[in-house]
Image (cartoon, coloured by chain):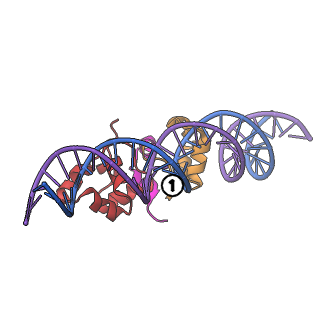
Chain colours: A red, B orange, C purple, D blue
Amino acid sequence: MKNRLKVLRAERDWSQQDLATRLEVSRQSVNAIETGRYDPSLPLAFRIADVFGLAIEDIFLRGE
Amino acid sequence: MKNRLKVLRAERDWSQQDLATRLEVSRQSVNAIETGRYDPSLPLAFRIADVFGLAIEDIFLRGE
DNA sequence: AACCAATGACAAACACGCTTTACATAACGG
DNA sequence: CCGTTATGTAAAGCGTGTTTGTCATTGGTT
C-alpha cells in the first residue's frame, strides 16, 4: 500500500525520527512503513492521520 | 476501536457471511472485527470502506 | 419437535506489525 | 579528517490479524 509519508514529512521538515516521536513508535517502524515494507495497523494509521491533520484516505493510497 | 459494521450490515440486510464474502475474508474475521475483538489491517479497512462506499473515518471511530 | 440460518466464541497454526539492537551508508559542519 | 544527523536494512522476539475447524445458542420455519 503506497503512501505519501515522505512528502508530508518533507513539507513539514520532519525527520523520520521526528515523526516517530510524535507517533510514539520506533524510527524503524516509520521507515518500514514509508518504504512500503509493511502497512501500519489501523490504530496507527489513525494516529498518522491525526499528526498530519489529514484523512487516512489522503495519506494512504488504494492503488497496489 | 469501535466501528459501525453491524449497523451498516443491517441497513443493507447483509449477514456476516455476506459481508465476509464481499470482502474475501472469513466469517470469523468479520465477526471478530464487528464484536471488537481486534482491528482489521489497513488494507482490509480500505476494502471495508469500499464495500460500503464510505470513508474509513465514517466506519471506524477514533474513540476508545 | 426437528431443522436451518445467523451469530458469538474458542483453539491451533501461520503471517504480519512493531519493538530493540545493531550495522552501513551518505551528507554536512567543525 | 572527525563527529553528527538522516536514512536504509537486518535479526530476534512478542503481540496481533487471519485462517480453518468446531461448538453452543438463538430465532424462524415446517
Magenta-drawn segment: B44-64
Residue A37 lies, in percent from the top left, at 37, 42
In the image, B25 versus C11, the foreground residue is: C11
Q: Amino acid at mark 1?
A: Arg
Q: Residues within 10 Å of mark 1 (few under 14, many from 20)?
A: few
In the image, B12 versus B2, the foreground residue is: B2
What residue would you read off at disc 1? B4
| Any part of residue A6 in sight | yes
Looking at the rendering, in which quadrant would you find the N terminus of chain A?
top left
Residue at position x 39%, y 60% in the image: A25
Residue C2: quadrant of the picture = top right
Residue D4 lies, in percent from the top left, at 21, 63
Element marked by disc 1: loop
Residue A22 lies, in percent from the top left, at 32, 64
Q: Is residue B33 magenta?
A: no
| Any part of residue B15 in sight | no
Looking at the rendering, in which quadrant would you find the C terminus of chain A?
top left
Residue at position x 24%, y 58% in the image: A15
Q: Is residue B55 magenta?
A: yes
Image side of residue C15 versus residue A10, left or right: right
Residue A48 lies, in percent from the top left, at 34, 57
Q: Magenta region, mostly helix, strand or loop? A: helix
Give the letter of the chain under mark 1.
B
Residue at position x 54%, y 47% in the image: B9
Image side of residue A57 versus residue B39, left or right: left
Residue at position x 59%, y 38% in the image: B26
